[in-house]
Image (cartoon, rainbow, N blue to C red):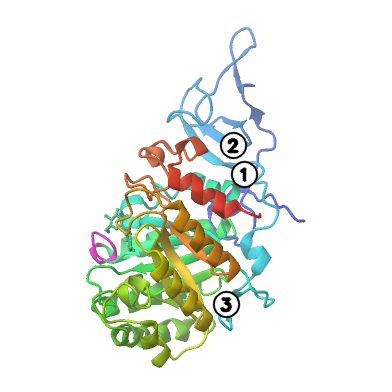
């Protein structure tokens, strides 16, 4: 078992991947042993810049304060002292690869990754629901293996500020990598549903991302979130344009392709089917196909599709919810559990929608959690508590 304590400096610049991200808490007072004493020599407060350890967490006062570390805006979160995680997912599994119809570790063991998808980075991204604190919670409390970073192309996403969103993606990749998480880079095309509409932007984006991160062993590229309104042939055509761009830079990159009918192998469209992909698969190796479901709306028919498709192809469930496909409404945990069981049995990896505090029932946290940076269990919605338990199961 290894456990490493790295200096805050090396971590802050994000140079180190695959290693436990822990704050250096040595020589720091533990709350309520305040660094500043009153005239009688009693502990009384912290001054600007003072550090305190509280609940196994390192905080720094931004200004004079006598408030409890971690509460209110006076405290800057600096990290966990002891992460409690002895070995990270990337340390455990190394570079991933497709093996037959499965996903395998570097040493060729069939594995299942479980984790969360972010919400759209333009709404709930860096500095909001994705911070050092929230990623520590995801890594060390939830013990997730993987974080999906959802970069919408439209709806105020990438197309409005390519440089800004590419930079945000770089930063988030560094933050997740520092915690030894796998990172699923999600090109979240959605409306329009034809991925070809954004093909030039996709080539630019992936060129920049893959070039900068090709030395890492923990990235997975999802080149099309949910193709819709187009037949499989259009998706396949798109994949043929984008995959070589990535592979020219990183030949062994693990790549995922969405499928027709909002990534359901056609199950959610009247004239699409799994057979379309069987007849004309993407002509590259080390490829996975994605399947998405929302368990309250997509029941036996879709579950059966996932079962059939995963017998034939490597499948990654890169998005699912325990509710309706609007991302809201009542949770159907009975249907959801059937999917969880199927995915466990077949070692199908998954990321759940979503790690944010948006008002819908599918967001893991209650509204306001991101603003207050409180990601404790008390802040979880019903779906968040349920999915956290599923990620932790058997750890
Ligand atoms: C939803 C979000 C919601 C947002 C909407 C449109 O939860 O806040 O207003 O997108 O951008 C998907 C999509 C995913 C959807 C999700 C729930 O990939 O972007 O998120 N969903 O509707 N496919 C099926 C369901």
Residue name at image x 43 percent, y 67 percent: 185
Q: Residue lying at the far right in this picture: please name it.
A: 1
Looking at the image, can residue 63 be seen?
yes
Asked whether the residues under the numbered discs 1 and 2 touch, taking CB atoms below 8 Å apart as contact, a structural biologist would say yes
Left-right relation of 17 to 239: right
x and y percentages locating residue 373 in the rendered image: 44, 39
Disc 3 crowd, CA 10 A, few/some/many (<14, 14-19, 20+):
many
Say above or below: 248 vs 102.
below
Tag nearer the camera, 2 or 3:
3
Q: Which mark is residue 23?
A: 1
Residue that badge 2 annotates:
58
Residue name at image x 66 percent, y 38 percent: 25
Q: Secondary structure at mark 3?
A: strand
Quadrant (top left/top right/bottom left/bottom right) for the C terminus: bottom right
- Give the extent of the magenta segment: 154-160
Question: Quarter-wise, where is residue 159 in the image?
Answer: bottom left
Left-right relation of 278 to 103: left
Displayed-image quarter of ligand 1: bottom left
User: Of 247 and 42, which appears nearest the observer?
Assistant: 247
């Amino acid at each position: 078992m290894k456990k490493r304590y790295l200096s805050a400096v090396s971590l802050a610049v994000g140079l180190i991947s695959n290693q436990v991200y822990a704050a250096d808490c040595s020589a720091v007072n533990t709350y309520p042993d305040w660094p500043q004493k009153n005239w009688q020599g009693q502990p009384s407060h912290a001054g600007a810049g003072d550090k305190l350890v509280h609940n196994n967490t390192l905080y720094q006062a931004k200004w004079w304060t006598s408030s409890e570390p971690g509460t209110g805006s006076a405290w800057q979160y600096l990290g966990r002292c002891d992460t409690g995680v002895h070995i990270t997912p990337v340390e455990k599994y190394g570079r991933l690869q497709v093996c037959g119809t499965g996903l395998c570790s570097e040493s060729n063991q069939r594995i299942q990754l479980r984790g969360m998808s972010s919400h759209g980075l333009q709404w709930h991204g860096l500095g909001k629901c994705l911070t050092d604190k929230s990623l520590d919670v995801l890594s060390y409390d939830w013990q997730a293996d993987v974080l999906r970073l959802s970069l919408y192309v439209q709806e105020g996403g990438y197309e409005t500020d390519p440089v800004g969103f590419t930079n945000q993606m770089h930063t988030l990749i560094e933050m997740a990598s520092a915690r030894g998480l796998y990172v699923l880079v999600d090109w979240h095309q959605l409306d329009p549903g034809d991925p070809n509409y954004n093909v030039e932007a996709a080539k630019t984006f992936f060129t920049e991302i893959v070039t900068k991160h090709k030395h890492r062993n923990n990235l997975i590229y999802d080149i099309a979130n949910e193709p819709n309104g187009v037949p499989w042939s259009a998706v396949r055509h798109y994949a043929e344009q984008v995959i070589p761009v990535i592979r020219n830079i990183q030949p062994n990159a693990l790549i995922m392709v969405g499928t027709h009918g909002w990534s359901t192998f056609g199950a959610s469209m009247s004239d699409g089917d799994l057979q379309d992909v069987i007849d004309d698969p993407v002509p590259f190796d080390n490829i996975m196909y994605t399947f998405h479901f929302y368990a309250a709306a997509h029941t036996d028919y879709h579950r059966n599709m996932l079962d059939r498709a995963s017998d034939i192809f490597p499948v990654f469930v890169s998005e699912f919810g325990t509710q309706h496909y609007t991302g809201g409404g009542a949770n159907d945990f009975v249907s959801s559990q059937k999917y969880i069981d199927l995915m466990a049995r077949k070692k199908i990896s998954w990321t759940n929608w979503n790690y944010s505090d948006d008002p819908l029932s599918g967001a893991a946290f209650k509204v306001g959690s991101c603003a207050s940076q409180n990601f404790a269990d008390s802040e979880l919605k019903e779906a968040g508590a349920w999915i956290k338990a599923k990620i932790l199961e058997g750890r």
